[in-house]
Image: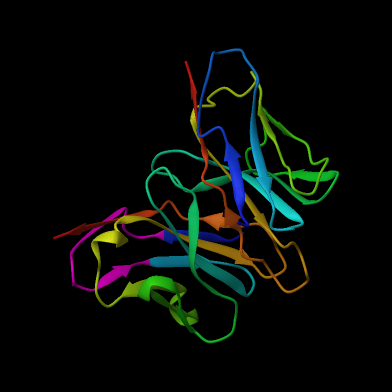
Amino acid sequence: AQSVTQLDSHVSVSEGTPVLLRCNYSSSYSPSLFWYVQHPNKGLQLLLKYTSAATLVKGINGFEAEFKKSETSFHLTKPSAHMSDAAEYFCVVSDTGSQKLVFGTGTRLLVSP
Amino acid sequence: DGGITQSPKYLFRKEGQNVTLSCEQNLNHDAMYWYRQDPGQGLRLIYYSQIVNDFQKGDIAEGYSVSREKKESFPLTVTSAQKNPTAFYLCASSRGDRGGGPDTQYFGPGTRLTVL
């Protein structure tokens, strides 16, 4: 069965500094991996997804993630944080051929001026 | 505008009452999903439907029921049998299984249910 672990429940950065949100996954098959963002009391918005094409995936708002099979990781990065990036971020895994998603517990990103 | 709408945004219910949450999409998606979100936890799947008039239980279906009579609508009923119904409920939709792996799921804005 697939699972995903988000290693940090909270990450704090200053505006203009890099962002790193960590995610490790477990999957029996070739996984599809996603990062979603949720602003307070809102639905989830897709940032990016990996589906066995290029291992470096570029998403919206300057975010990107790298799929590393040897490390079973799919960390989310951004070179320079903006105040508007403050939100909750979810790493999500799904096995190929399945429509079911498995969510991590989320990482809350705090951005200070 | 295309998208997913959920209503109401906030809902209050007395213990022992059933309540129905609405989810409508105009994206022409085949598949629809209901999730529950609790503080400090990820989303958990309640029910999903890949086609009209068919649906499957997710990981936490007890105390919930759904129907899928129309492609664009997937209402969720929280019954009195659900022991801890206070949560944030999110509906999602996707194009459906096209044999190429999971589609992107698009989410509605959510309904916050509080049991008094």
Q: Is residue A14 magenta?
A: yes
**Residue stretch in magenta:** A6-22
Q: Residue furthest front?
A: B1
The picture places residue A20, in percent across and down from the top left corner, at 30, 70
Residue B96 point in image, percent of width and height: 74, 61
- Tell me which colouring the rendered structure shows: rainbow
Pick out the residue farthest to the right.
B53
Question: What is the quadrant of residue A52 in the picture?
Answer: bottom right
Identify the residue at horizontal 49%, vertical 59% (top origin).
A45
Locate residue B64: give its quadrant.
Answer: top right
* Observer-nearest of B84 and A30: B84
| Left or right relative to B40: residue B36 | right
Looking at the picture, does residue B114 appear above or below residue B75?
above
Q: Residue at x 60, y 45 (%)?
A: B5
Residue B52 appears left or right of A81: right
Label total for image: 0
Left or right: A77 in relation to B100: left
Left or right: where B28 falls relative to B35: right
Q: Residue at x 50, y 84 (%)?
A: A55
- In the rendered image, the vertical position of residue B61 relative to residue B63, given as above or below: below
- Looking at the image, residue B39 lies above or below residue A19: above
Quadrant hosting residue A107: bottom left
Q: Quadrant of the N terminus of chain B?
A: bottom right
Residue B74 horizontal/vertical position (percent): 72, 41
Q: Could you tell me which residue is drawn at 51 percent across and 61 percent down?
A: A92
Between A24 and A101, the one lying in front of the other is A101
Residue lying farthest bottom? A54
Please determine whether, in this image, residue A97 is positioned above or below residue B9. Answer: below
For this orientation, the residue located farthest to the left is: A113
Magenta segment: does it hold B30?
no
